[in-house]
Image: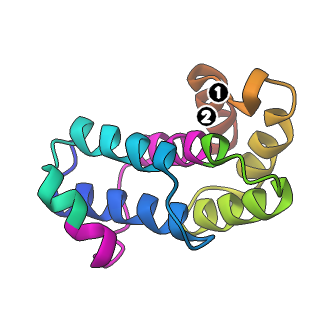
Amino acid sequence: MINRVEKLSLLSEMIAFAKYDKDIKNIEYNFLLGVARQLEISREDFEYLIEHPVMYTHLKSHSERIVQFHRLVLLMNIEDSGDASKGATKLYNFGLRMGLSHESISKVLYLMESFPNKIVPPDVLIDIFKTQYN
């Protein structure tokens, strides 16, 4: 299980991902607030993170990094900015920073196009990373 510092770091990273194009849209805000609740982060702490990001903490667990990458995939797809290549590049870079393999990230980005709303199901995503990890 991840600790509070790691949870704040995850949420801060997601906020940075959403703010990449300057503004957090309402749908993104609500999604992030839902993730905060899931991580047991108070609304006050969540609001504070929007203006005061915390330093990135690298997750030790490979499975936690995959879960975080999946959250970023979901966040990217609810954003619907119209510029898919910009979002894909952003997601790719965040995945690399998390220490995920570039082959797995590329495969996820490629397969996204074949799923409704570009949302890769969790089991497919896990299988992609499992294959590359072994």
**Does residue 62 appear left or right of residue 87 in this picture?**
left
Identify whether 39 is placed above or below 50. above
Q: Is residue 53 visible?
A: no
Give residue 101's quadrant in the image: bottom right
Q: Amino acid at mark 2?
A: Lys
Q: Looking at numbered disc 1 in the image, what kind of residue is underneath it?
A: Asp
Viewer-nearest residue: 108 or 24? 24
Residue found 86% across the figure and 34% down from its top:
113
The region drawn magenta spans 48-75
Q: Position of residue 97 (x, y in %)?
A: 56, 69
Q: Local crowd at mark 2 within 10 Å, few (<14), some, or many (≥20)?
A: some
Q: Position of residue 62 (x, y in %)?
A: 45, 47
Quarter holding the N terminus is top left
- The residue under label 2 is 130
Outermost residue on the front side: it is 26
Viewed as shown, does residue 71 lie left or right of 50?
A: right
Q: Position of residue 21 (x, y in %)?
A: 63, 70
Of residues 48 and 106, the one nearer the viewer is 48
